Image (cartoon, rainbow, N blue to C red):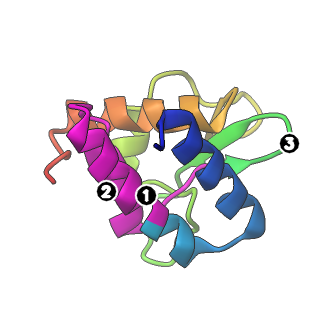
Amino acid sequence: MPDRDTFEAALDELLARGAPERVADMRLVYADWLDEHGDLAAGAQRWMAREGKSPRGSGVSWDWWSYGDRPDGNPEDLPLDIWRRLPGDALAGARHCKEFPSRRSAERALFKALMLLNRLAN
């Protein structure tokens, strides 16, 4: 029976392979599992799947970026209103970047920002 760590490991593997369509599918399956377990983070997983968003791993940290609300943004580029509500401060040398120690913590920060903006509708 799958558990949270199983889903997280599957996401890590798919992100490492660079398979965005498979990442989105896994996020939707994970969101259903989270719903079944009463976890509101399901809405954040659905949002990331729908919007094609994932934090960028640098080898040292996992980062969310914002360069405004451009339609041609990368998967790690968030809309400005969401990025501004992420916990933490922008990096001193990269004012459009907020870094987190793990993918999970970066996604948890996104969940908090989406909660503040009331954007977690399933």
Cβ atoms at labels 2 and 1 below 8 Å apart: yes
Q: Amino acid at mark 1?
A: Arg
Task: Give the residues drawn in magenta, as a range.
Answer: 26-55
Instruction: Determine whether, in the image, residue 56 is placed left or right of residue 36.
Output: right
Q: Which mark is residue 46?
A: 2
Q: Residue 49 lies in magenta, yes or no? A: yes
Q: Secondary structure at mark 3?
A: loop
Instruction: Tell me the residue that label 3 is attached to.
Output: 59
Residue at 31% in and 56% down: 46
- List x then y, in percent, for residue 1: 46, 43
Q: Residues within 10 Å of mark 1 (few under 14, many from 20)?
A: many
Q: Nearer the viewer, residue 55 or 31?
A: 31
Task: State which quadrant residue 76 falls in.
Answer: bottom right
Q: Secondary structure at mark 1?
A: helix
**Which residue extends farthest right?**
59
Q: Amino acid at mark 3?
A: Gly
Q: Secondary structure at mark 2?
A: helix
Mark closest to the chain's N terminus, 3 or 2: 2
Mark closest to the chain's N terminus, 2 or 1: 1
